[in-house]
């Protein structure tokens, strides 16, 4: 299938085109992350995030594709992985300075805020987010438990639910609520 066909299908909202892309470039994109000190799970997550970025740019008509789709996805994966490595590096350095008693209290308060907002989401979103973030279920287990057709579908739904949750939290709370 040509890149122009993929773009056209995605712009029409055909999610199967995204599934086709996922399978077509899976080994190449996850291989990039694994070769750069990532785990297979991290590689899957990064690739999923890259596909979501691609999907959103296409459906919002913000994508200006000057290369092949594979090249675009490759660069998005690399950029996302670099950001993840930077985040991990900062966490490692920051961990040395934490007052863990304070951190535990702060975490409980944040968790309460997040739970309150999750309760305002629809039943499916609530289940997905609770299973993933609070019950530590894998996306495979969530897909099976909720009857999704694939893990990719579950990941996409989780992403959309998390975006809705982010909006709810931002609407109800200011950044200072989290920084006090």
Image (cartoon, rainbow, N blue to C red):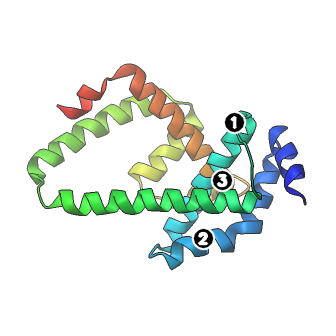
- For the residue carrying disc 2, how many other residues have a C-alpha within 10 Å: few (<14), some (14-19), or many (20+)? many
Quarter of the rendering containing residue 85: bottom left
| Residue at 74%, 51% in the rendered image | 66
Name which residue lies at 25% across and 27% down: 177
**Among numbered discs 3 and 1, the one appearing first in the sequence:** 3
The residue lying at 29 percent from left, 28 percent from top is: 175
Disc assigned to residue 144: none
* Left or right of 134 in this view: 156: right
- Residue 125 figure quarter: top right
Q: Which residue is mark 1?
A: 62
- The numbered mark, 2 or 1, whose residue comes first in the sequence reads 2
Cβ–Cβ below 8 Å for labels 2 and 3?
A: no
Cα separation, mark 3 vs mark 1, equals 14 Å
- Check disc 3 and report the residue beneath it: 51
2 vs 1, front mark: 1
Left or right: 115, with 31 as reference point: left
Task: Give the structural element (helix, strand or loop) at label 3.
Answer: helix
Q: Marks 2 and 1, Cα distance to the nearest angstrom?
A: 25 Å
Q: Is residue 113 left or right of residue 166?
A: left
**Helix, strand or loop at disc 1?**
loop
- Looking at the image, residue 62 lies above or below residue 10: above
């Amino acid at each position: 299938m040509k890149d122009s066909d993929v773009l056209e299908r995605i712009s029409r909202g055909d999610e199967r085109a995204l599934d086709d892309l996922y399978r077509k470039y899976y080994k190449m994109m996850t291989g990039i992350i694994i070769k750069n000190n990532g785990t297979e799970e991290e590689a899957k997550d990064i690739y999923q995030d890259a596909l979501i970025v691609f999907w959103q740019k296409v459906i919002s008509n913000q994508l200006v594709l000057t290369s092949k789709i594979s090249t675009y996805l490759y660069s998005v994966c690399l950029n996302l992985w670099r950001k993840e490595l930077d985040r991990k590096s900062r966490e490692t350095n920051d961990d040395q300075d934490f007052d863990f008693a304070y951190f535990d209290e702060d975490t409980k308060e944040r968790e309460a805020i997040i739970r309150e907002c999750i309760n305002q989401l629809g039943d499916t979103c609530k289940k997905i987010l609770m299973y993933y973030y609070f019950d530590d279920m894998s996306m495979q287990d969530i897909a099976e438990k909720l009857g999704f057709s694939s893990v990719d579908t579950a990941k996409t739904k989780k992403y959309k639910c998390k975006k809705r949750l982010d909006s709810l939290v931002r609407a109800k709370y200011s950044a200072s609520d989290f920084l006090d």
